[in-house]
Image: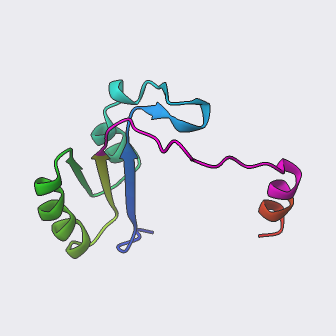
Amino acid sequence: MEKKNLKYVLFNNSSHESVGGQKTIASKIDFNKLAKGFNFKRYFKTSSHKDFKKKLTKFLKLSGPSFFEIKIQNKSLNNLSRPKNLKKCKELFQNA
């Protein structure tokens, strides 16, 4: 069954923040092919703010399933908090 309201958004900075911004292989993945392999009807990609506004409007208007890859810079907040109590996180996740 096709989900016409499914919208998937990938913020792609080609890194993994939880390990200090370590590079990943995301820059080598063809997310268009990946999306098609998962039967997304539409694929959008942008890396500019101006282009983002246009494509976002179209992405939201068209029926899905749709995949939107948004290329972003590899930056992080200096004061980005990290989980302190992993057992509590596990409990919250299991009870959700």
Q: Nearer the viewer, residue 13 or 45?
A: 13
Which segment is the magenta one? 71-90
The N terminus, quarter of image: bottom left
Q: Please tell me whether residue 75 belongs to the stretch shown in magenta.
A: yes
Quadrant position of residue 50: bottom left
Image quadrant assignment for residue 33:
top left
The one of 89 and 58 positioned closer to us in this rendering: 89
The secondary structure making up most of the magenta span is loop
**Residue occupying image coordinates x 35% and y 73%:** 4
Q: Position of residue 95 (x, y in %)?
A: 83, 68
Can you name the residue that lies furthest to the front here?
A: 79
Q: Is residue 50 left or right of residue 26?
A: left
- Residue 95 vertical position relative to residue 86 in the rendered view, above or below: below
At 79% from the left and 48% from the top, the residue drawn is 84
The residue lying toward the viewer, choosing from 75 and 2, is 75
Q: Position of residue 65 (x, y in %)?
A: 34, 64
